[in-house]
Image (cartoon, coloured by chain):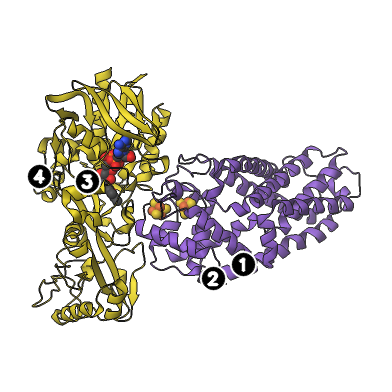
Amino acid sequence: MSLDTIPEARRQIEICNACRYCEGYCAVFPAITRQKAFADGDITQLANLCHNCRGCYYACQYTEPHEFALNLPRALAEVRTESWEDFAVPAPLARVFQRHGVALAGLLVLAVAVMVLLARGGGRTFYDVIPHGVLVAIFLPAFLAPLAVIGVSLRRYWRKVGGGPVRLAHVVSAARSAGRMRNLDGGQGQGCNFEKEERFSNARRAMHQAVMWGFLLCFASTLSGTVLHYLGWPAPYGPFSVPKLFGVPGGLLLTLGAVGLAALKPKGDRGLGDPAVWGGEMAFVLLLALTGGSGLLLYAVTGTGLVAPVFALHLGAVMTLFLLMPYSKMVHGFFRFAALVRDAQGR
Amino acid sequence: MTWDLVVIGGGNAALCAAITAAEAGCRVIVLEGAPKPYRGGNSRHTRNFRCMHRGPLSVLTDEYGEDEYYEDLLKVTKGQTDEALARLAIRGSEESLPWMEAHGVRFQPSLSGTLSLSRTNAFFLGGGKALVNAYYACAEDLGITVVYEAQVSHVAMDNGLFEGVDVAVAGGPIERIAGRACVIASGGFQSDVDWLARAWGPAARNFLIRGTPYNRGVVLKDMLDQGAESVGDPTQCHAVAIDGRAPKFDGGIVTRLDCVPFSVVVNRDGKRFYDEGEDVWPKRYAIWGRLVAAQPDQVAYSVIDSRSLDLFMPSVFPPVVADTVEELGAKLGIDGSALAATVTEFNAACREGAFRPQELDGLSTEDLDPPKTNWARPITDPPFYGYSLRPGVTFTYLGLKVDRNAQVAGPEGNYPNIWAAGETMAGSILGQGYLAGFGMTIGTVFGRIAGREAAAYVA
Ligand SMILES: Cc1cc2nc3c(=O)[nH]c(=O)nc-3n(C[C@H](O)[C@H](O)[C@H](O)COP(=O)(O)OP(=O)(O)OC[C@H]3O[C@@H](n4cnc5c(N)ncnc54)[C@H](O)[C@@H]3O)c2cc1C
Ligand code: SF4
Ligand code: SF4
C-alpha cells in the first residue's frame, strides 16, 4: 500500500526537521525530531497525530509563494484522508462518505424513512412508538458491527505505524491529551489558528470538547437507560433520573458544540485542510447537531402527538451516525487516539 | 494628509518603533516594501533573542549579566563596537522581553539541538514569523496603517528636516507620503547583488542570500547620498557556509549544514584548504563562509562516511550518496580521483584514539597540511555522503550612524526628526562578526527607543 500524498508530506517534514521552529506547538514536531528518515508508516503516524491547529502554517516562513511551499496542515490532512480510506473495510465506502456530504444526507433520509415505517404511530412514550425489543434488535448490531469494522482498521493502522504492545501508561497519556485536546491549545493554551488566521483562538477547541464530552454523556445516558430497562424500570424517566442527568447536559453540549463547529468551519481557510473532504466533514458535523438536537426535542415533546415523528427523526440520525462510524469523520477519534497512544510509546 | 510618523520597513525594528509610537498617541503609517506573505524582512527568519537577565526570566534559566554579555560581544567583534550603544542594547534587552510578551510574542525553551543557548537566548514559539505576526496583529489593534508592497525610494528633507517619503505602491507611480517624523528600519543592502559585487568583489555574485530579497539598501543609499553619516565597513558582509543547493534568496535557517566538523572539506579541485575540526561548529560556521568565498567558484564539498551521518542536525536537502569516494566525487561534479586521493591521504594521516563527537576530542591528524585537529576519524565506511557548500550572506555591516536616542547623524549634526533602528544602524554595535540573537536585540531595543523619541518629538 503506497499513498500518493505521502511523498509530498515527507518532503515538507524533512524541511521541518531541518528547521524545528514549530517544536512548541504540538506533539507532531517533537516526534519529527526523534527521527532522521521517515518511512511511509512514520508519515501516516505523524499525519494522524496532527490535529490541524494550523499554527505551523501561519508561523512558517516558507509558505507559498516561497519555493519550499510549506503547508504542513494540508499535507498531513491529505495523508490522513487517504490513510482512513485505505484502512477502511471496505475502502470504497469511506471514499464515498468522507468526500460526499450528499451521500451522508441520502443515507440519513433513508434511515429516517425506515424508522417512520417501523413506527406504529401514536403513544405517549417512545417505546409505544417502537418497542424496546425491536430497538435493541436493530441498534445493537448497527452499533457493534461498525465498531468491529473499526477494530480491523485500527489493527491495520497499528501494523503500518509499527506500534508495540500497549501499556496502561500509554493509554493514560493519550487520554490526558485527548481529554483536554492538548494538541489544539497551541502549546501554551492560546488555542489554534483555525478561524482567525494568524491570531489564536480557543473557540474550535472549546466546541470540539463540547461535542466530544456531549457525545460521551449521551452515550452514557443511553447505556444507563438500557441498564435501568433490564432492571425493570422502563422509560420515561424523570428529570432527575440517571439517564436524564447524563442525557440533557450531554445533548445540550453535543448540539451547541456541533452548531459551533459548523459555524466556525466556513471561516477557516479550506486550503489548510483537505479540500476534498470539506463537504463530507460539514455534513458530519451537521449530523451530530441533528442527533443531539432531535434528542433534546424528543424530551421536550414527551406526552404530545409529536413523539412519533421526532422519535423517527432521532433514530434515523443515530442510525446514520452509527453506520457511518468507520466511513465518516467520526473515525478520526479512533485514529487520533491510536496515534496518541503510539506517540506515547515513542517518547 | 500628514502622518505623525512614517516608518520605513516592516520587520522587527520597524514594528517595535511603530507600536511604541502608536501607544504614545501617534498616527503611524508603516511602509513595508514586501508583499504581505513576505512581510517581516529577515526578522521572519529568526528564532531567538539574546537577553540579559539577572535571574530566571520567562524561559531563560540562571542569569546572564551585562558584563558577561558585553564580553561575549567583544569576543566576536574583536573590539569593533561602540561601548555606550552596545551596553544600551544589552541593558535594554532585559526589560524588552516582558514588553515583547505583553505585545503577543511567545517564547519557548530552546529548540532541540540548541541547548547551549538555553541560558542566553529566548526562542520564539513558532519562530520569527510568529513574532512578526503578533506585532502586525498588535499594530492592527492599535489602528496603525500598514501598506504592503510599498517601496520607498527617497527620504525627502528640507534643510535636514524630514518632510515625507517617495514611495511606489505595488509597482504604481511614485507618490509622496508626508510625515512629521520618520523611522528608518529597512535593513541592510545584501539583496542588491550588484552592490554586493561592487563592495566585495565579483566573487559575491556566487554568494547566496539567506534572507529576504527585499533588503536592497535603497533607503540606506538614498540617505548616504544625502550626506548622512555612515558606520560599518562598506565592503563587508556576514557570510556563513550553507548548503550549496539553497535558493538564491530567502533559504533561511534550514539551509545551514552542520556536517563540516565530522567531514573532509575539499574545493572544486578536490583539495582540502582548512582545518575542519578547529572548533565546535557554532563557533566556526561564520569563518567557513569566508573560507568558501575564497575558493575557486566560491564552492566547496563536505564528505562524510556512513558512521557520521547521524552526528548532526538533518539537512534540508538529502545528501549525495555513493558507494565509493570516487563515484561520490563524480556525482558532486568534481574530479572523483582527485577527491579519492585527498581522502586516502587524509585517512593515512588519522591516528588511533577515542572519537567523541560532543566535545573537542583532540583526535588530530599527523603530518597533514592543513591538519584536522579534532574529530579526525578516517572516512572509510560506505555509503559515502557529500554536500556542497556556498557562502550564504546574513547581513551587511554598512549602516546609518545613530546616537543613544537612535537619532540619525547628518552632515550638520543629527537630523531633528529622523531615527533609525535595526540592521540599518547595527554596524556601530556589530562592527564585525555576529553574536547569535543580537540582531533582534538591537532591533527591539533601538526600535522602541526610536518610537519613543519620535513620539516625543511630534507630541
Ligand atoms: C536566516 C537568518 C536567521 C537569523 N536568525 C536570527 C536569530 O535567531 N536571532 C537574531 O537576533 N537575529 C537573527 N538574524 C538576523 C536578524 O534577522 C536581523 O538582525 C533582524 O531581523 C533585523 O531586523 P530589522 O527590522 O532591522 O530588518 P528586517 O527584519 O530585515 O526588516 C527590514 C524591512 O525593511 C523592508 N524594506 C527594505 N527596503 C525597503 C524599502 N526601500 N521600502 C520599504 N521597505 C523596505 C523589508 O521588506 C523588511 O520588511 C537572522 C538572519 C537570517 C538571514
Ligand atoms: S512549518 Fe515551517 S516554520 Fe514550522 S518547523 Fe516546518 S519549516 Fe519550520
Ligand atoms: S497543524 Fe497544528 S497540530 Fe498539525 S502539525 Fe501543525 S502545529 Fe501540529
Question: Which chain is home to disc 4?
Answer: B
Q: Secondary structure at mark 2?
A: helix
Rounded to the nearest angstrom, the CA distance separating label 2 from label 4 is 58 Å
Measuring from the top left, give residue B431's x and y in whole percent. 13, 44
Rounded to the nearest angstrom, the CA distance separating label 1 from label 3 is 57 Å
Which mark is in front, 2 or 4? Answer: 4
Check disc 4 and give the amino acid type.
Answer: Gln
Question: Which chain is home to disc 3?
Answer: B
Measuring from the top left, give residue A323's x and y in whole percent. 73, 59
Q: Secondary structure at mark 3?
A: helix
State the image quarter where residue B154 is shown: top left
Measuring from the top left, give residue B201's x and y in whole percent. 16, 53
Question: Which chain is home to disc 1?
Answer: A
Residue B195 is tagged as 3
Residue at far top of view: B459
Q: Which residue is mark 4?
A: B80
Q: Which residue is mark 1?
A: A87
Check disc 1 and give the amino acid type.
Answer: Phe
State the image quarter where residue B133 is shown: top left
Q: Which residue is mark 2?
A: A160
For the residues beneath circles 1 and 3, the answer to whether they share a chain is no
Task: Say left or right for B250 vs A170.
Answer: left
- Which residue is found at the position 39% from the left and 59% from the top? A15
